[in-house]
Amino acid sequence: MNVAQIIDRLRADRQFQGIPWKVIPARPARFAGFPEALDPRLIAGLEKRGIHDLYTHQREAIEAALRGENVCVVTPTASGKTLCYNIPVLDRLLRNPQARALYVFPTKALSQDQVHELQSVVDTLEVKIGTYTFDGDTPGSARKAIRSAGHIVVTNPDMLHAGILPHHTIWIRLFENLEFVVIDEIHHYRGVFGSHLANVLRRLKRVCAFYGSYPKFICCSATIANPQEITERIIEQPVRLVDDNGAPAGEKHFLFYNPPVVNEELGIRRSSVKEATRIAMQFLNRDVQSIVFARSRLRVEILTTYLKDALRRQHKDPNLVRGYRGGYLPTERREIERGLREGKVMAVVSTNALELGIDIGKLDVCIMTGYAGSVASTWQQAGRAGRRTDVSLVVLVATSAPLDQYIISNPDYFFGQAPESATVDPNNLIIATSHLKCAAFELPFVEGEGFGFDPASTAEILDYLAEQGVLRKVRNKWHWSADAYPAEDISLRTAAPGNVVILDTTDNGRVIGEVDLFSAPVEVYQNAIYMHETQQYTIENLDLADRKAYARPVEVDYYTDAEIKVDLKVLDAFAQTRVGEGERCHGELSVTWLPTIYKKIKFGTHENVGWGEIHLPESTMHTTGYWIQFPEDIGKRFDIEQKELGEALHALANTLRQVAPVQVLCDPTDIRAQAMLRSPFSELPTVYLYETYPGGVGFSEKLYTHHRRLVEAAISLLTGCKCKEGCPSCVGPVLEIGSHGKNGALLLARAAL
Ligand SMILES: [Zn+2]
């Protein structure tokens, strides 16, 4: 049975009657042929690979790159975007074997994938073109060869920052001849991470200029609201946008499914995990290939278990279903990806790890267990389904979370919403200064030289660093003078580096998986059930200092779920001023996470069958925050009932978090909001915004300084939003903030002016 026939069946199915059902029409392919200017050897090679023509967007991008323009290609997954950069790069390398290109991917998995794809084209050319991955896993013995013979070096921003740029003197061949820099998945670099990348690129361009090269940039992005703007801010040069997709697409059906209510009184719905399993089985039983997304690693494992069990009951091969998430070993992941491409794996259950461009071919059906959290992510996940010409199907199965329930009951909100826009601020003083240090380490600064900033402002920062003893000014040059090596102390990402490996104690300590340091305390604590596809393990011991978790295979009928207590503490208020009825403040905060207990939850019924304590030290992050505190009797003064005050504060916190990123040029994920009815610091009703980056990068102080502008923006968002009682664009969904939340937030915002 094909997807079109299944869709007809679903239309007749009672459970799917009357649910929001949107049909996105098919789009034919538009071809444009190869540019005449291309090297005939390359065209011959492509034809050997079965590529006989180019889509319109590919030709447009390739021609612009060959003309020497910077390009940003914005087209969905599997629209052939890799050819948009591989063709101009290979064309150049065929003409000039000295030329070099640098490919930057956000993750290792993606770079391996792309090297593979690139290599298959290179192999057809019968010319020696060295393409190598240079990342943390590259063995020392291979590094020298890559530096001298790598025509195309594939890396990630972290490695470029700490492993390549500081050692530019041994990378002379690359920097003297660098003609193209490819940045894939550029939408990934938002907020703080994007601001870091922009500064790494400033350093790259500076080193290149020193060796006499001026590379052009070819970037690719998923659909976001402002791809051209974000690319221009990151590379700080004009960019040609190529976004008129010429690749074909079949008709796509998008269904919004809300599990039925099982308890009217409590408003409890049937479990989204079970409903997603049931829906996925309908496709598995009809040999239709599908991908099931779930929001957490635990849910991925539960769904995988349920689907494999269902197959076993039907005496089918459980390996038709595979799980996929961070923490699986790379070899395992490659095997699953291959299985999907070859059609041996019929369903994959994944976290958003498969949202990025990893090549798994196109599937027929995408089931999302829960809303992906943003419009852009939802479209990216939905993009996994849809072969070139066939009909495809996307089913969003709502959880009972307020945001899911809002989206499911207001599908027009989702379809009418533009994907989120991204922001970066290359001139964030804290970020730019840390890279200025790295740049000075790489090459001394000469008077009159700018680093993103104009020369006068750059000199001011350099003088400041000289006063701190980090630099030394001799005549007209600033030299690096500290002992330490700056790039090592500067991490481009929020998450702490390093992983905890999970070892099977019954199998000579074989590594079965890994988990990032940050998640280890909530996933592999002592007595946790660690699930890895079909195998269950119990964790005997977690040794955080040694970064090892010791596991033993078991067979149990439950899984474990940890409860975490998050605490926000004010350590120091740097400034505090009266505003309206309240006070605005900024200062240092500590955020602590402590896993407290775990629950044992039975498979199938999801009933709680026991619990245990988790004994681990708390994890702490020091950062900076901005907050507004209100007098104790604020409720009385503004006629907000005490029981509604908590919701009003919560609603205000959500609103401020919506408008804050625009004020300080960061990504929504760079800032968190929290409301407290009674803050332990001041004992007053308080709304906090704090930075998710350790130490903070100055957003809180900016919010404090621009308090009025921020609160006014919140008020105009609240009064301008067309929803009656709240929606995800302003205060949050009603289920989360209550029916008086929106009004309460408005009263409190006005009181803070
Ligand atoms: Zn609204």
Image (cartoon, helix red, strand yellow):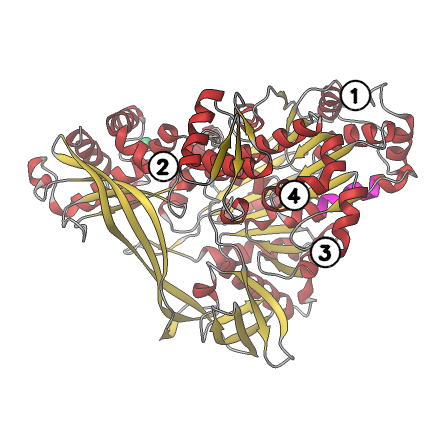
- Residue kind at label 2, given as amino acid type: Gly
Q: Nearer the viewer, mark 2 or mark 3?
A: 3
- Find disc 1 in the rendering and name its residue: 32
| x 68%, y 70%: residue | 315
| x 10%, y 41%: residue | 631
Mostly what secondary structure, the magenta segment? helix
Residue 552, visible in the rendered structure: yes
Q: Earlier in the sequence, mark 2 or mark 1?
A: 1
Q: Earlier in the sequence, mark 1 or mark 4?
A: 1
- Find disc 4 in the rendering and name its residue: 167
- Find disc 3 in the rendering and name its residue: 140
User: Looking at the image, which is closer to me, 202 or 283?
Assistant: 202
Quarter of the image for residue 629 reads top left
| x 42%, y 66%: residue | 561
| x 52%, y 23%: residue | 447
Q: Secondary structure at mark 2?
A: loop
Q: Earlier in the sequence, mark 3 or mark 4?
A: 3
User: Residue 120: within the magenta?
Assistant: yes
Question: From mark 2 to mark 1, how far is it between C-alphas?
Answer: 49 Å
Q: Nearer the viewer, mark 2 or mark 1?
A: 2
Please report the bounds of the magenta region as a residue range: 113-121
Question: From mark 1 to mark 3, how far is it between C-alphas?
Answer: 44 Å
Whether ligand 1 has any atom under 8 Å from the Cβ at mark 2 is answered as no
